[in-house]
Amino acid sequence: MLHKKLKDFPKNFFWGASTSAYQVEGAWDKDGKGPSVIDMAPVVPGTTDFKVTSDHYHHYKQDVALFAELGLKAYRFSIAWTRIFPHGTGEINPLGVAFYNNLINELKAHNIEPIVTIYHFDLPYALQQKGGWSNRDTVDAFAFYCETLFELYGDRVKYWLTINEQNMMILHGDAIGTKSTVAVENPEKDLYQQNHHMLLAQAKAMKSCHEILPHAKIGPAPNISAIYPASSKPEDVLAASNCSAIRNWLYLDMAVYGRYNNIAWSFLEERNATPDIAEGDMEIMASAKPDFIAFNYYSTMTVAASAGDASDRGSTGDQQIVVGEVGVFKGASNPNLSKNAFGWEIDPVGFRNTLRDIYERYALPLIITENGLGAFDKVEEDGSINDDYRIDFLQKHIDQIQLAITDGVDVFGFCPWSAIDLVSTHQGCSKRYGFIHVNRDEFDLKDLKRSKKKSFFWYNALIAKNGAK
Ligand code: BGP
């Protein structure tokens, strides 16, 4: 629809920004924190590790003051499970608890709404050693961790996100460093057993949140991309529908309706990869309800009909680069879109498509918890950083949110990635996303000084006008 008149962004819209604990905090072994799977994973050659990152752990006051100056209404961050429970469960770590108390208090003091991701890729290594998500005990450990967070911070935190990008941990765990390395007889079945356990853990979290904090709101936070067929050939359209069912809807259908969709389930049956479902699991999932859907959007995906052989898989992928499924779909590139420096297609209109698709299917309020452009920023002689490409990317995506709102989609917030420079999941810290520059290089920590990029001033002005032009 070519709207003649656009609707305004809602009053009290959450103009925010995002980070995750392991990518921004550093202090990986400080004040009693235990190791996570990320801390123990091999570092991708040529990129930094996650030991110091942006050292937000020691700079949080300064960073929150900058977020306030930026004009943020909301800040989406994650809690490191291993700061609260260094071994995943058991003894609580008071210094870790104190860090998030301080951070949340600092945000509230600056009138910034905290939006908390409970688990963002950094499973406690102690749990991984006992089988991680393959082990059903991890569901109970997660449920207990969640209850602990609700009790500790629920008086100040109203918005909770269960698990960041569970779908990417399942589909691209090798790229983002979360994949279990334990040898198992049927790796695909094991993977979808892990998935089932995470879905169950999420359902338990949503239920206990509603019990313990009746006024709080909680939702899932997958990575969702509209999937395009490579052509109007019916076989390509079918492939796109397959891909969407497996990559997108499997996760949200479970979160919202508590059911495996038929296409995803038959895909699992074909591969002898259906999870073992214990008595009572489906009842728990069906009775747990999210209050909203949070999702991360970077790009759309394009797929073609399967060739029926190993060529379907293609080369290695990551969160936004399709790895095909033999016999189901194969990745294709979209000739209508340009790509960023890391091969991710740029598709603002696809953002509107994605917002509409999700709202059509679930009719729940939506918040975007990640969207942004990874780029090699250049610091000029005078210290300025002129990231016009980032401004252009974000403005085009914000325009599409407004169009989606005009289409009738209920959107209550936008938290681009990332509030401040941090370390990418698998491509180091030279791939920058922030509004705030952090002075360090891949292997030289320098002084970690914060400075404002051009996009900082642009976003500040946009927030002040509630997105109006
Ligand atoms: C998402 C993750 C984030 C973030 C972002 C950018 O998948 O939730 O943690 O890192 O992608 O990806 P990358 O760091 O790979 O550029």
Image (cartoon, rainbow, N blue to C red):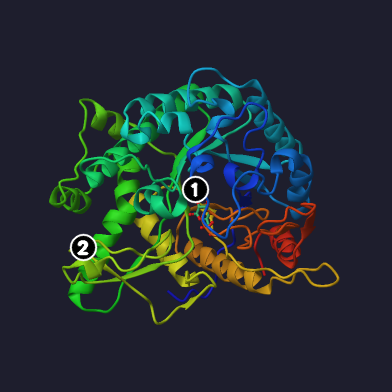
| Residue 252 image offset from top left, x and y in percent | 35, 47
**Left or right for 467, reference 349:** right
Disc 1 residue type (three-letter): Pro
Disc 2 residue type (three-letter): Val
| Residue 303 image offset from top left, x and y in percent | 30, 70
Where does label 2 land, which residue?
A: 326
The residue at the far right in this view is: 382
Quarter of image, res 185: top left
Tell me the tag on residue 42.
1
At 47% across and 64% down in the image, what residue appears? 404
**Label 2: how many Cα within 10 Å (few below 14, some 14–19, many 20+):** some
Q: On the rendered image, what quadrant is the C terminus found in?
A: bottom right
Q: Is mark 1 within 8 Å of ligand 1?
A: no
| Residue 8 image offset from top left, x and y in percent | 59, 62
Q: Is residue 20 visible?
A: no
**Left or right for 370, reference 104:** left
Quarter of image, res 263: bottom left
Disc nearest the viewer among 2 and 1: 1
Q: Is residue 237 visible?
A: yes
